[in-house]
Image (spheres, coloured by chain):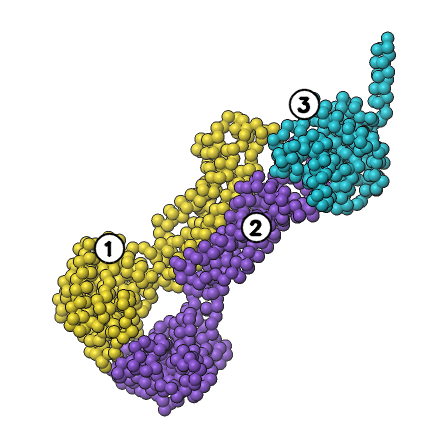
Amino acid sequence: MEIRPIVSALLRNKTGALLIAAQIALTLAIVSNAAYIIRDRVAVSSRPSGIDDESRIFNITVGSIDKPDDAIAQQKREEQLLAALPGVESVASSNQVPLGQSGWNMSLFLDKAQTESSAHMAFYFTPGPLVKTLGLKLIEGRDLIEADVDEIDMGNDNRLGHVAVISQALARKLFPGGESATGEHVFVGNAADAPEYEIVGVVERLQSPWSQHGDDGEYSLITAIRPIESYANYIVRTAPGQVDRVMRDAEAALTRPGSDRQVIDKQTMTETREQRYRADSAMVWMLVTVTVLLLLVTASGIVGMATLWVNQRRKQIGVRRALGARRFDILRYFLTENLLISSAGIALGCVLALALNQLLVSRMELARLPLGYLGGGSLALWLLGVVAVYGPAWRAAVISPAIATRSA
Amino acid sequence: MLKMTRLSKIYRTRMIETHALRGFDIHVREGEFVAVTGPSGSGKTTFLNIAGLLEDFSSGNYLLDGVDVSGIDDNARSRLRNEKLGFIFQGFNLIPDLNLFDNVDVPLRYRGFAAAERRRRIEQALEQVGLASRMRHYPAELSGGQQQRVAIARALAGTPRLLLADEPTGNLDSQMARSVLELLEAINAMGTTIVMVTHDPELAARAQRNVHIVDGQVTDVMHETAMRAVERIDASMHSNA
Amino acid sequence: MFRYYLQLGFRSLRRNPVLTLLMVITLSVGVAASMSTYTVLHMMSGDPIPNKSDRLFVPQIDTGNMIGYTAGEEPDDQLSYPDTQRLLASGQGVRRTAIFGINSAITPERADMAPLLTDGGATTSDFFAMFEVPFRYGNPWHAEDDARNSDVIVLSRATSEKLFGDVDPVGRELKLGDASYRVVGVLGEWEPLPRYYRIINGNGGAFAGSDDFFIPFSAAVRHEKRNSGNNNCSGDAPAAGYAGWIASDCTWIQFWFEGASADDQFVIKAWLDNYAAEQLRLGWLKRPVNTRLRNTMQWLKHLEVVGRDSRIQAWLAFGFLLVCLVNTVGLLLAKFSARAGEVGVRRALGATRREIFHQYLIEASVVGLVGAALGLALSFAGLWLISKQSGAMAAVARMDWTMLLATVLLSVLASLIAGFLPTWRACQVRPALQLKSQ
């Protein structure tokens, strides 16, 4: 339709149009990159840990000042004490918690002769039903049993267990041919006296305490050890909705008068997850805020500029109406004009977005922006432009044609 | 061509009710060149706005080229303006951001003509007003008289049935005014009906018929023409003597 | 004239209230977003000890074995116990110290108080002078205490007050783990940001947490204290027991040299390379010489103390400010061009173009000032939101005077930049033209 005259009119009044186009370009550049980061962070922080219904899990770490002489007996007593609390479904002590951000990271070797390790993996150990307590899905072989447990005085004894359940991701990494991992033997370290493990089972998924972004976030091994230590960390599964109450009861029971235990740490799995992804969710909120504000600012800029243009062209609009333009024609004129400016801004914005992404890729090690985000961002800004300009354009459309005969 | 009967226009604000036109009767026949005169505030502009379908009227009857326009909607009015009417304004009202070609093009776009047809009409209209060579110029590069001629070209390009002119020479010096008026007369001679609003009696004298408005009513339509006729007779008698 | 223009500026704020409000909000939101994220960055990347950061050095030595060796790989960030001992005895620089973290319970004298679970550091007497640690009571222990493995302890102010109340506890005894220590000093307020002296720690990271106590390195080893931070063993597993562990090439100790001047970096680096070559010859080190010696700021950069997320946020926030600026230019343009008539009148009454320029630029900066006030308030709100994220963020999301001033300057500068184009355009208005058409 009337694109050419609109363009030539625009070219004679460049400043405002350029400002709006620049604003749209910058907005698109920032918003498309922000949207991509947001989606990426949301995807990362919603990966499953392997735990069935995390809202029912908590962990509590207790310690004594001196290493007790009956550390093993004390741990067993405490496990029974916790298991007997109302609302408790299962208890297992464990050296670390998935997503807990601290723990044991070990190198795994299929053969001691290897110079490069086969995988770096999270090393879980437990004397109890950890697989059942976390609700991990056993997809091959068997779970660890009481008879597998080695009692080890950590720090003075270099043994580290002898049977293992591993995660499916680790099994695939170790045996990429797809052969069954069960029955295979692996080593932690490649020293002459490196501990050897027989793999007895595979669980579908178990994230490491660090839940790294790559596949290695799911490389985990669980072995059966009862450590002789001055502290113990218990993981507890509760009945639905009772996790907070049970955690309070557990603390009271473990530190009851006469006990020398102190609570070093306690956390529900929900809190653990929140803490693990706190930086990510902070980033997401910051970017969502910036995105929303940006769109608002840009929309307000378009409204402001369009209002100015309408006011400046009241007479002209009246003349057009007098010459036979329908209200719809006037509305369409401003919408088309806006669409032209938006399109120019969006074209520039796509270039800027890729440039900004290139900067983020090279300086911040971010991933490359998928082009779909540019498409989505462009569409959103086109839409934003139309919505923002609609008000001023409508006010232009209802200007009376009689204004044309007014002198001045 | 244009027939208003017992037309009235009332502007209402919260405090005041102004009767801009009351019991207004006028009949312009096809091919006429009518001048509408009157002191300022008499209702000339209101009449022009209503005649040009730029404003609605409060009561009465208005037939434009045989069409009863009372109560038709905004889109239909736009179409009538576009197809049957041409406007010439005192302030020219060219669009400053468009060159002459694009200015004349404006009403033709709304008419929905094909590009080739529009081009033919624009060139012809600009030719007619003697500005075909300056098609790519912008209004600011032209003198007032030239601008008004572009405005006339814009009005003519759509081959209107009725040309409405609002003080077409008000912003021009006398020499330019004369050439514009001559142009209007030539257009009228080719069959286009013209209604011109002016407060300049000299200009009005060149029209075939004068309509005088006072306080929103037509007074004594024939009076002035009759007087002038008498004057002319006097003059010829003197010259004879 | 300046005051007159200022008055006009403030008066004009009320003229198009919606447009003006929009401008002020746009500007202040942009300033607040960029300043609150930049403040975090500024605090994170600050120099914790500006007077000597260029002569405090951290050594790194590659203690790995030849299995999986890649030339030029970054050596571990911490040292092994045997290397630490030899570096402490090296005599290089003016001071040397080593530190590792300890997790231990302190049993108060009063029987009715529960033991305190505490985090602290095992270090040498030079530590306190090297890092200019202020003392509220007492003094650091002496070099002889290091040599004699004395059971002495320096407490943080908070720990001291928890254990003894607000009194001078120097000379009193307390039980740390299962041994008794004599208090020799209590620290004053000391919260370097970041915690550069022991970035690698298990109790709060670079920006949060603090050490509750310090004991002599030698005493900690005598009491077989294991470190509570990172422990990286590359080769064969250490022999069983504490003695086996400290004799191994496992790295778990952070080390610092203090040079007499920044130039000592070259001297000490050369010595370190010699040392590594010597140890390679003696068979302690297995890999070809591969050492580093970084000064404080290089060390903080190496450990990526400034979070990548914080930098991305600051970048995007400044991009946002840029959009706000462009937007303000547009809005000011709208506001000023609506007043072309006024300019025409002023010009007709004898105002020079220069005077119009001044008037409108001052008017633009009035918008900036109001925006600055609001922006400052919003920045504090933004920082408050950021500080809710975590303890570390709470430590860095604090505005200092520099940032406060920078915020105000930024808003005014932003509005001046934004006001420039519209002002220039307003100056182009010719006197007669506008009078006629009004």
Tag 1, which chain? C
Question: Which chain does cyan denote in the image?
Answer: B
The reply to whether discs 1 and 3 touch (Cβ–Cβ < 8 Å) is: no
Depicted C209 relative to depicted B61: above or below: below
Q: Is residue B198 visible?
A: yes
**Horizontal side of residue B114 vs A293, given as left or right:** right
Residue shown at the point (53%, 41%) measured from the top left: A15
Question: Which chain does purple denote in the image?
Answer: A
Residue shown at the point (54%, 57%) measured from the top left: A377
Name the residue nearer the viewer: C240 or A90. Answer: C240
Residue type (three-letter) at the residue carrying disc 3: Asp
Provide residue B212's location: percent of width, then percent of height: 80, 27
Depicted C34 relative to depicted B151: above or below: below
- The residue where tag 3 is placed is B173
Q: Residues within 10 Å of mark 1 (few under 14, many from 20)?
A: many
Residue shown at the point (86%, 16%) measured from the top left: B233
- The residue where tag 1 is placed is C54
Residue type (three-letter) at the residue carrying disc 2: Ser
**Horizontal side of residue B226 vs A340, given as left or right:** right
Residue type (three-letter) at the residue carrying disc 1: Asp
The numbered mark at residue A256 is none
Q: Colour of chain C?
A: yellow
Tag 3, which chain? B
Under circle 2, the secondary element is: helix
**Horizontal side of residue B133 vs C311, given as left or right:** right
- The residue where tag 2 is placed is A342
**Horizontal side of residue A396 vs A33, given as left or right:** right
